[in-house]
Amino acid sequence: MSYELEQNISVLSGVGEETAALLNEMGIFTVNDLIEYLPYRYEDYRNKDLSEVKHDERVTVEGVVHSAPLLQYFGKNKSRLTFRVLVDRYLVTVICFNRPYYKTKLNLNEQVTVSGKWDQHRQTITLTDLVFGSRTNANEIEPVYSIKGKMSVKTMRKFVEQAFKKFGQYIEDLVPNELMSKYKLMNRKETMSLLHHPIDANSLKQARRSFVYEEFFLFQLKMQALRKIQRNQSKGIPKVLHQDKIQELIQSLPFPLTSAQNRVVKEIFNDLVSPSRMNRLLQGDVGSGKTVVATIALYACALDGYQGALMVPTEILAEQHFESLSKLLQETNINVALLTSSVKGKKRREVLERLKLGDVHILVGTHALIQDEVQFNKLGIVITDEQHRFGVGQRRILREKGYFPDVLFMTATPIPRTLAITAFGEMDVSIIDEYPAGRKKIETYWVKQEMFDRVLGFIENEIKKGRQAYVICPLIEESEKLDLQNALDLHSVLSFHYKSMAKVGLMHGKLSSSEKDEVMKAFAANEVQILVSTTVVEVGVNVPNATVMVIYDADRFGLSQLHQLRGRVGRGSEQSYCILVGDPKSEVGKERLTIMTETNDGFELSEKDLELRGPGDFFGKQQSGVPEFKMADMVHDYRTLEVARNDATMLVNSNDFWKANEYKVLREYLERTGIFDSEKLD
């Protein structure tokens, strides 16, 4: 970037200390920051035909004053002025608040241009802007900026205009010429100028198109460069695959691998034999068979003399994974061990000793795996399940217990492709998007609150067959007390209703981890037949005997959350059911519950959820994995996102990008953003 654009904002006339401080609060420190401070919306002053305008839409119309203005005062210094305007065949009432001076300025039969909010039912416009005569000389579309303190939008527009006049010539293109020609993009100077001063709707559309591509391209360039540099710097140790023995294990499985599982196993094997360290995210819907894939990867490494670690978030999950792996590998010479905080004393010392000697080939456990006392002999692969539950630091500690181990992250949360290629852009992403044959589809129903008695009867029938049920209450962040009361009320209602028939358990946020584990173990052992819970029942916990999932106030959950909960049942051979109880008031709430009854595909649901909620809410406000873009929208512009990713990948993987002069601007951009240091880059 040229020195001129890097100058302090105070080089602009009219920007004194006070104004500079205000602009700094808005994140504007340099001339370039100001040029890149884009409007958050635009006022559209194009004349509209009222027959085509929707209710509550913003509108601009030209007409003739048809009645004398009527002025009314209410409260202290508050006024309401109304007058009628004849617009074509419409007689429209214009309502204007706190502008009493228009009473003397408005004349009958005078032409005016009115902008404001259109009320189709009352045929009124609530005024925001009034021009006497026509707006022929004014801009059709005007930018509106997010401002602070005493700063006005008008002043902001003047500063931006001044910045372009003085420094516009120094704006350089960042997107390479061949890509700009290929997609017919505007140059950067024209793009930025039109985003601040659109000539008309079409010019704004074209400028937005160019800027969205640039935003995605630069972001993906950072991701792909980071990925390449990490690969170059994170050398791995190529493993030797003992294909005969691996095939023997696959043939011995109680069920054939799906084509999706086969594809993912192949992708993982390619990583294992590569001289670069594996850094892969494995996504698979609930019940799609991720554990089997992980077992094959761990077994392949163990055959070549390397130890493997599988870290999961909870003890009960660790125990279940330990049992699964032990069962799948029982005919082999591979030793699997379990390490959680419950493994104590002599047993613990024995596991740690065997691990250090290399006698334990695969260690399954919780956070206990990252403690200092845990020492591996030759750790070659690290797998973390539900990776978002562990901090970056915790995952790093586990990695560092080995010598360049391969790393596989697993998640049962279906992440939409659009989010996966942004939030996890520096990882390879594998997806298991197919269910094992013979798995029964969970039948899903949406019922209103008044039908809850029928739901209780349905649960009763399943319990008589020896089955179990979950009943989930929503967790509303604002009021944990209210949530707890909900759960306690529901628990007491169900305990009374099923008093002679079933034991009802309760799990809520106030319980300690060990108490939650105890409740979950009692449910898994069928000592408790109905489990009422406020918190999301642990992902991955396997209770094959549970066939009913009732979700109370289901409209308060997101689609992905509902799908995760539904996945707690349907794990045995019996038909399972998910019953959504809710009376949503909003259209989005109704749509959400309808979609749930129509599909069991987690990836389809996650895409819908993204459309309904947006990327910020998908991961939750605490997750910082999703980047903020100035104008690009990952949901609506996802095709551009994919194109930009492919372009950035091809560029970063070419030798020219790192050497040729034509890409110098982009290399400098990456250096400024801290992706690499050119002096250290070979």
Image (tube, rainbow, N blue to C red):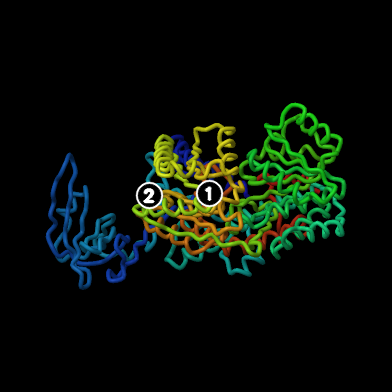
Nearer to us in this view, 112 or 43: 43
Residue 151 found in image quarter: top left
Q: Is residue 391 left or right of residue 191?
A: right
Assess disc 2: are there few (<14), some (14-19) or many (≥20) residues with their C-alpha within 10 Å of its C-alpha: few
**Residue plotted at (38% across, 58% down):** 587
Is residue 8 shown above or below 82? above
- Find residue 116 and report its horizontal and vertical position in percent: 28, 58
Position in image of residue 427 (x %, y %):
69, 52
Q: Nearer the viewer, residue 451 or 244?
A: 451
Q: Quadrant of residue 318?
A: top right
In the image, residue 82 sits, relative to residue 200, either above or below, namely: above
Distance (Cα) linking label 1 and label 2: 65 Å
> Which residue type does callout 2 highlight?
Lys
Q: Which residue is mark 1?
A: 468
Residue beneath disc 2: 154
Q: Earlier in the sequence, mark 1 or mark 2?
A: 2
Tag 1: residue type? Gln
Q: Residues within 10 Å of mark 1 (few under 14, many from 20)?
A: many
